[in-house]
Image: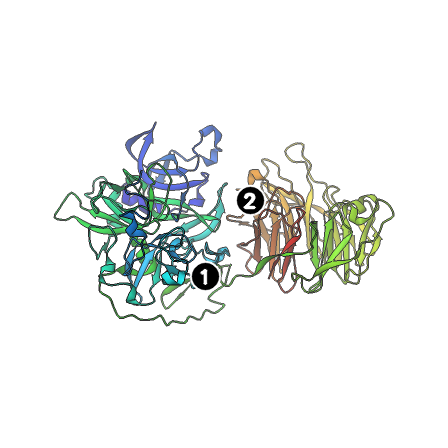
């Protein structure tokens, strides 16, 4: 296998298909044995931490060889950190007041490649060079997506970009950068504005599926980190703008081909080890020949392949067709992102020697020589539809295009993240139009909130340690919550509110509240039929340790995991009947199993449990086919931690996993559309659910981590699953550093969940 064949193989890889742990790079090069490079070609896997084989599960060990096109190719494993974006002993002084670096920092009119530039309200980075937009013939500035588009992600991720915006339209660009990152920048960004982002390659454009590596959320495939800026007029440039600051070679510059770029790592090619030049905001012009310094740069021959870079709005991503640049000095530093990379091809054949652009700097490592990472200009040109500029300035034209996207063309957050119109692909970027999720204050006093429910427009919430129910009659809107009358006193054990966790549900015109202590010591629950204005104590059939209360098929149902029982009421909470669920087997020899979730659809009800026996390929639950009256043991697909909750809605059942810190990388939920006769597995991607609770309304399932049972597990995302297409979860970021109650949702799609860890707040999603 040669380097060209290796690149074809590497570009065909989906990294998450490999079970080899936290992979940070896949490249082609020579195998290293005991610190010495051999002449044996291999596929090299970079990992965050190289461990002894005895410390790695057998399935996660990289095999000694891979079969590629019927050829056995050796492998190697090296330790390689996660690369980072570059906004922020050197060849030149890094003092922005000292030449030659000063020339890159200064405000330049006319503009040139290599100057300081960034999106407005960013810090500082680099304008790579000027190119021509093939779609309309206009001259545009090129740099990284994280420089000019603030790292927009595909809309499927429902995340804002690094600028806190939800699209690229309002992202204006400036030159020079923002003070104090650049002392020559004006505090009024309008004075330094040079245009706005015209197009950007969104993070995840190749493969927007994502997964949790064990240390970070990672997107499977991004082609390049690049964006272009349209100028407001051509008054900002002239024919000299085709040049790059500090480069001895004047423009225009050709783009290298893919073959020429790959040949930089081919030991048999005259381009092997060719000199590299780049010029950027922080280190200025670096590379000889190409500048008057004695600093040398070259492409690392063994670096061609896939590399993991982060972080983009809490994600990292695998970038394809990347390569490293290194020298006898620092190659790049923070602020050099976007610098154009040039290689002197056929350098040892003077008659053929020529400088060509090979790519853009977009990331790097803080190692001894500040290795830079480049993205190929061929990929940039393809994705952004650009070509080299010859220095001639065309007639300036404005963009006048209107696109109409129908709902059939565009399904936000679910199956579609891009649409092709008139032969051109348009991406949904950054979460537009994003549903609204916001935090709100429910009470001025911090509470241990335990549950919330609704009957449409009226919402009631309960907390541990108080006997007050909080109420909103305005669809849960912030500022509309207040206490109602107290829950009733009970005959023994104090008041309901002085117990542990409370659980609340609505159905058939009645509200029911179960409290753990009231259920245990007094065999009572509370009931209201006037939307929480007044409450009465209602006997239940036996002492009961409730964990949840629901309304299923015109019945109130409460579940006790510790007792493996449910209590049901056929008359809206006035009388209760105790029903024993089938005894669960112990797992791993001695551990008790508990039921934790229950749901129903007409006569069919299913309960799920945490059962997870090593060596057994199923989980255990219970099923009823007579509206919850009698139950039998029931097998579900295996999950490493069993299941924590289940819900039914719109002909679909969804069971969500009981997960511990030790098995967060191997969890999935299961879906059935035939009343539990068969189940399909849905992987979460990057999401790390730990004890999630799930609910359904308005055609969608919603889940959040349950802080009531494990206060150590802070929620970071709410999962949303469309019941009409129950194959892929989308995720909405929620405020961190807290845990949440089971979400409640009404028929209009308003979702409310309350923070459980002694706070005053909740979240509302509409």
Q: Which mark is residue 667?
A: 2
Q: Is residue 242 above or below residue 291?
A: below
SS at circle 1: loop
Quadrant that contains the N terminus: top left
- Can I make out residue 223 in this image? no
Local packing at callout 1 (Cα closer than 10 Å; few below 14, some 14-19, many 20+) is: many
Q: CA distance from mark 1 to mark 2?
A: 32 Å
Give the side of residue 188 with respect to residue 747, left or right: left
Query: Residue visible at 35% across and 44% down?
Result: 333
Quadrant that contains the C terminus: bottom right
User: Which circle's residue, 1 or 2, is located before the other in the chain?
Assistant: 1
x and y percent of residue 702 in the render?
A: 60, 55
x and y percent of residue 531 in the render?
A: 77, 62
Most foreground residue, 761 or 559 = 761
Q: Which residue is mark 1?
A: 167
Q: Which mark is residue 444?
A: none
């Amino acid at each position: 296998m040669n380097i060209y064949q290796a690149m074809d193989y590497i570009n065909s890889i989906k990294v998450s298909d490999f079970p080899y742990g936290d992979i940070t790079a896949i490249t082609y090069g020579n195998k290293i044995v005991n610190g010495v490079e051999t002449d044996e070609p291999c596929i090299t896997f970079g990992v965050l931490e190289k461990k002894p084989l005895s410390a790695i599960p057998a399935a996660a060990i990289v095999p000694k060889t891979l079969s590629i096109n019927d050829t056995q190719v050796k492998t190697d494993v090296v330790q390689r950190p996660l690369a980072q974006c570059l906004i922020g002993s050197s060849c030149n002084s890094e003092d922005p007041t000292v030449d030659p670096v000063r020339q890159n920092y200064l405000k330049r009119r006319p503009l040139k490649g290599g100057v300081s530039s960034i999106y407005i309200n960013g810090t500082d980075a680099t304008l790579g060079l000027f190119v021509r937009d093939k779609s309309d013939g206009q001259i545009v500035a090129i740099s990284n997506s994280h420089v000019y588009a603030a790292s927009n992600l595909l809309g499927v991720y429902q995340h804002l970009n690094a600028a806190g915006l939800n699209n690229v339209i309002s992202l204006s660009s400036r030159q020079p950068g923002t003070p104090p990152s650049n002392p020559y920048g004006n505090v009024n960004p309008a004075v330094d504005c040079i245009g706005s982002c015209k197009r950007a390659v969104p993070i995840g454009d190749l493969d927007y599926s994502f997964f949790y590596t064990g240390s970070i959320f990672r997107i499977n495939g991004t082609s390049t980190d690049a964006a272009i800026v349209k100028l407001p007029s051509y008054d900002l440039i002239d024919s000299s703008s085709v040049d790059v600051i500090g480069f001895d070679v004047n423009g225009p510059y050709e783009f290298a081909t893919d073959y020429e770029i790959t040949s930089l790592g081919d030991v048999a090619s005259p381009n092997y080890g060719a000199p590299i030049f780049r010029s950027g905001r922080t280190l200025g012009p670096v590379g000889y020949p190409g500048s008057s310094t004695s600093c040398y740069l070259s492409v690392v021959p063994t670096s061609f392949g896939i590399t993991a870079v982060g972080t983009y709005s809490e994600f990292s991503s695998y970038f394809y067709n990347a390569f490293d640049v290194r020298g006898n000095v620092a190659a790049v530093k923070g602020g050099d992102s976007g610098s154009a990379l040039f290689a002197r091809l056929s350098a040892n054949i003077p008659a053929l020697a020529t400088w060509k652009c090979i790519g853009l700097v977009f990331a790097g490592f803080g190692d001894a020589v500040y290795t830079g990472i480049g993205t190929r200009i061929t990929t940039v040109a393809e994705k952004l539809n650009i070509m080299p500029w010859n220095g001639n300035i065309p007639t300036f034209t404005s963009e006048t295009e209107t696109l109409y996207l129908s709902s059939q063309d565009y399904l936000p957050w679910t199956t579609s993240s891009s649409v092709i119109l008139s032969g051109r692909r348009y991406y949904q970027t950054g979460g537009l139009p994003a549903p609204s999720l916001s935090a709100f204050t429910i009470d001025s006093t911090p509470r241990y909130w335990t549950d919330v429910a609704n009957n449409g427009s009226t919402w009631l919430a309960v907390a541990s340690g108080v006997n007050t129910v909080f109420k909103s009659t305005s669809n849960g809107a912030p500022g509309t919550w207040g206490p109602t009358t107290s829950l009733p006193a009970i005959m023994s054990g104090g008041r309901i509110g002085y117990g542990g966790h409370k659980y609340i549900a609505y159905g058939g015109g009645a509200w029911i509240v179960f409290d753990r202590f009231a259920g245990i010591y007094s065999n009572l629950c509370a009931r209201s039929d006037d939307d929480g204005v007044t409450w009465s104590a209602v006997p239940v059939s036996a002492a009961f340790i409730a964990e949840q209360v629901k309304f299923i098929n015109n019945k109130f149902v409460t579940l006790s995991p510790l007792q493996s029982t449910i209590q049901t009421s056929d008359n809206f909470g006035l009388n209760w009947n105790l029903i024993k669920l089938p005894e669960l087997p112990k797992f791993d020899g001695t551990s008790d199993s508990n039921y934790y979730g229950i749901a129903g659809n007409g006569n069919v009800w299913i309960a799920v449990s945490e059962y997870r026996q090593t060596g057994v390929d199923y989980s255990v639950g219970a099923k009823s086919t007579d509206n919850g009256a009698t139950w039998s043991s029931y097998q579900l697909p295996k999950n490493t931690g069993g299941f924590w909750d289940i819900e039914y809605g719109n002909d679909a059942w969804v069971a969500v996993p009981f997960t511990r810190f030790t098995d967060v990388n191997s969890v999935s939920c299961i879906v059935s559309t035939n009343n539990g006769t068969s189940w399909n597995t849905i992987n979460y991607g990057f999401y790390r659910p730990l004890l999630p609770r799930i609910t359904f309304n308005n055609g969608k399932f919603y889940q959040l981590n349950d802080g009531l049972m494990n206060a150590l597990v802070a929620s970071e995302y709410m999962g949303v699953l469309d019941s009409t297409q129950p194959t892929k979860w989308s995720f909405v970021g929620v405020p961190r550093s807290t845990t949440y109650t089971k979400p409640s949702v009404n028929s209009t799609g308003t979702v409310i969940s309350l923070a459980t860890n002694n706070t005053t707040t909740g979240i509302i999603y509409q």
